[in-house]
Amino acid sequence: MDIIERHASDPQAIQTLSATRRDASANFLAGIVSAWKIGLLLVLSLAVLFFVKGTWHWPLVGDAPLLHYVVFLAQHGRIPYRDILDPNMPGAYFVEWIVIHFFGPGALAWRLFDFGLLAAAAACMFAICRPHGWFAGAFAAGIFALIHGRDGLADLGQRDLVMSVLLLAACACLFSNLRLSRSRRREFALALASGFFFAFAASIKPTALLFAVPFLILSTIALRRRDRPVARHVAAALTGFAIPGIAILVYLVRAQALSASSASISTTRNFGKNPGRGSHSRSSPRSCCRWFCCGCRLRGCGKVGRASREPSFTAVCLQERFRSSSS
């Protein structure tokens, strides 16, 4: 009050004093918010560490053992779709082969792969949220990891998780490309990578196309509004998008399994479907017999003696069938 009375005749001094007080209040509030963010991230970090420590010993369950077995058979001369009737897309087998080839076939290897997916998702979230500060990316990554842990053992390294991480990587490349200043090499590389990740995700489950097409269209519109070259971006994205499809097509043609792949996927995806009944029809004796006899039978193992010397893939699938229907 003494300062205000002393400088009452000086409006500039009063304005300076008011601005100083406003700045002090803003700094105080910013400090409180920063402390709250740091505390929240510490809690999230402890929860994630507890999740990692508490689930390190989780076994290999769910769809992973079935895909492991298909890859095992493929490494020993069998051809997916032609010799093995299975509904999974080719990208799922390729991911499984990468894990087995680089990490090993055991449960610990699959657990490391699952943690690696979470780390990759966190990196993509940081890249996407970078303009909005470090807190947005860290919070998103922590919540994503905890929600994934809540889903339980059956969702470790699942195809949906792999597809989600690939979609996050594609979006991170697109957004990074939009934020770039004019750099032709980096623009082309990021657009190529985004198209590749979108196509890779679609090779695991085609539903990824529902995300890929809108994002590519919106990124093209954003580039046009910023007066940046669109043709090069579209060409690079389409080139990257074509790489996984061409690789899968070449493999299926060389393995003489192109027609068998479409028949296998469409046939096995229709097993157990009955619009007039509930989900219990999937565990009916007729459905299980169809699954046992047709769903995963290996061609070339028709002889009883030969089939008895190999691990029974049908038995494993039937066990998983009853497990999923009883849960």
Image (tube, grey):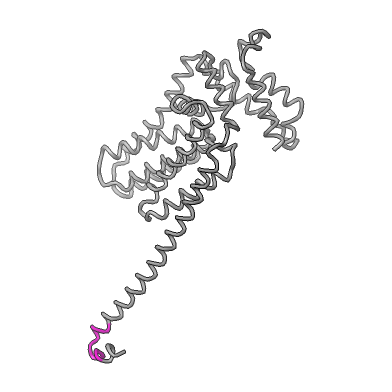
Give the x, y percent position of residue 323.
68, 32
Which span is picked out in magenta? 6-14
Residue 67 counted in the magenta span? no
108 sits to left or right of 23: right
> As rendered, which of 177 and 116 lies closer to the eye?
116
Q: Position of residue 196 (x, y in %)?
A: 40, 33
Name the side, left or right, on which 171 lies relative to 324: left
Left or right: residue 187 compared with residue 70: left
Q: Nearer the viewer, residue 38 or 3?
A: 38
Relative to 306, say whether 20 is above or below. Answer: below
- Please identify the quarter of the rendering in which residue 19 is found: bottom left
Relative height, residue 286 to residue 21 (above, below): above
Residue located 51% across and 26% down the image: 105
Task: Pick the residue in front: 118 or 259.
Answer: 118
Q: Position of residue 200 (x, y in %)?
A: 45, 32
Left/right placement of residue 270 relative to residue 210 reads right
Q: Quadrant of the C terminus?
A: top right
What percent of the width, then of the height, locates residue 197? 42, 35
Q: Nearer the viewer, residue 124 or 210?
A: 124
Residue drawn at (26%, 90%) of the image: 8
